[in-house]
Amino acid sequence: MAEFDSKKALAIDNRNRTMKDCLDRSFEQAKSIDMVVSFLMDSGIKTMREVLDDLKARKVKVRLLTSTYLNITSPTALYRIKKEYDDVFEIQIFNDSSISFHPKAYFFHYEDDDEVYVGSSNFSRSALESGVEWNVRLHRSEDQKAYSIFFEDFEYLWQERSIPLTEKLLKKYANEWKKIVRVGSEEQGETSTAIEPRGVQIEALYELNKTRQEGAKRGLVHAATGIGKTYLAAFDSVPFKKVLFVAHRKEILEQAKQAFENVRHCSTSFFNADEKCVFNLYGDVNQLIYDYKGIEDWEEISFIKSNSVWVLNENYRNTIQITEYCNDEFYSEIIPIGLEGPRIKSCTLTDGIDRLLSELNVEKEKRIAILCHSPQQFTILEKSFKDFNFLSKGKEQTGKIALLTVEQAKGLEFDSVLVYAKEMSENERYIAYTRSLNALQIAN
């Protein structure tokens, strides 16, 4: 890459060479770095993780100036940097909401020279690899006037027009931020099959780690349904050699076993342990059915809180339609982060069951369930079936529709759910509605 080694101006358009390829080499050689980007995205951090890990190992200091302009910068990205790279990154936020903020520049400082990449690329995967972007690299020794203009302006913005990203400021921004899917946005289409923390899980993990560093031995995370509490517990367990996960039902433990093995890449087993261990509690008081099996308010166990409680309100599991329906039904304020799905259907039992049978006929492996208040209602529901061969009472079975009470369905997920809501309490309806990942029908 002879052109790269030259100190002449270098044009980068993500076609002949990508911004990532160029930044990789500059990150690897720099003694210190200054960055200013309008928008910081989590995909950018993941894309540059290898060189960022190298910066951390070499203790290369980075000043990062970004903005909350248009609420596009991802709180997850900010939390990820603070969690994983806080030792080397100093972050400040542009502090004038009355004007737009669109600079993108990457300054690299070497022993004998400096260089800057200036152009259109924010810190996101598409901007660094595949998007239509125009950038140019300039060296101070070759283009001193242009370089000085950019760097002096960066120093002015850093010293006079920005403020440090405090934990208070980050928490306020995270609480006010809502993920907006924009056509043509920098994050559109950026998917990953990697199993890793996302969204408010990053925030919770950061806060848990921080309180442990402050000496806390116990923690409590209050999370709405759909946040991914089991995987959050698995991610949180990674630094520890021995982990005990406790649940009240075997089915939940079996699902948790898969989650912990996916995250920790180790074998697990069901066992009893009498050793002392770090204890974190994850739950949702809105899923209480019977008083003797749980609590109605976290204050009931305030003696174990240790001032380490976090309330998470984003739903990654259910469709946007299901989350918004629950918000309207139960006066909640859960933020939907899921995919679009079919609208919620009110139906008769007969019509609802006919739709489930049609779905099962098309896809035998599909997980489908009918949920009701009590086993006594099974008889009513069975009368709507012409062929009992398609029905499995009290348990899941491949190729059949599971007929379960709400209590039996707690902690489980299904592709399609019909809820027979008669006699259900508000908490039971909340649990039943959120068991569906995609299609939800309600019969009264």
Image (spheres, grey):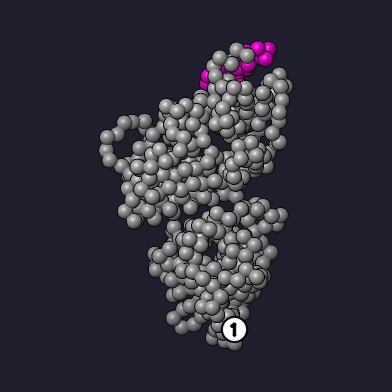
Q: Quadrant of the C terminus?
A: top right
Q: Quadrant of the N terminus?
A: bottom right
The amino acid pointed to by label 1 is: Ile
Horizontal and vertical percent position of residue 54? 43, 64
Horizontal and vertical percent position of residue 367? 59, 28
Horizontal and vertical percent position of residue 332? 59, 41
- Front-most of 386 and 157? 157
Horizontal and vertical percent position of residue 431? 55, 32
Q: Residues within 10 Å of mark 1 (few under 14, many from 20)?
A: few
Tell me if residue 41 comes above or below residue 396 in the rendering.
below
Is 436 on the left-hand or right-hand side of 294?
right
- Front-most of 364 and 227? 227
- Front-most of 161 and 402? 161
Circle count? 1
Tell me if residue 432 comes above or below residue 390 in the rendering.
below
Image quadrant in which you'd find residue 8: bottom right
Q: Residue at x 38, y 36 (%)?
A: 245
Tell me if residue 194 comes above or below residue 274 in the rendering.
below
- Whether residue 316 is visible to the viewer of this picture, yes or no, is no
Q: Residue at x 64, y 59 (%)?
A: 186
Residue 382 in magenta stretch = yes
Mark 1 highlights which residue? 149
- What is the span of residues highlighted in magenta in the rendered image? 381-401
Task: Give the secondary structure at mark 1.
Answer: helix
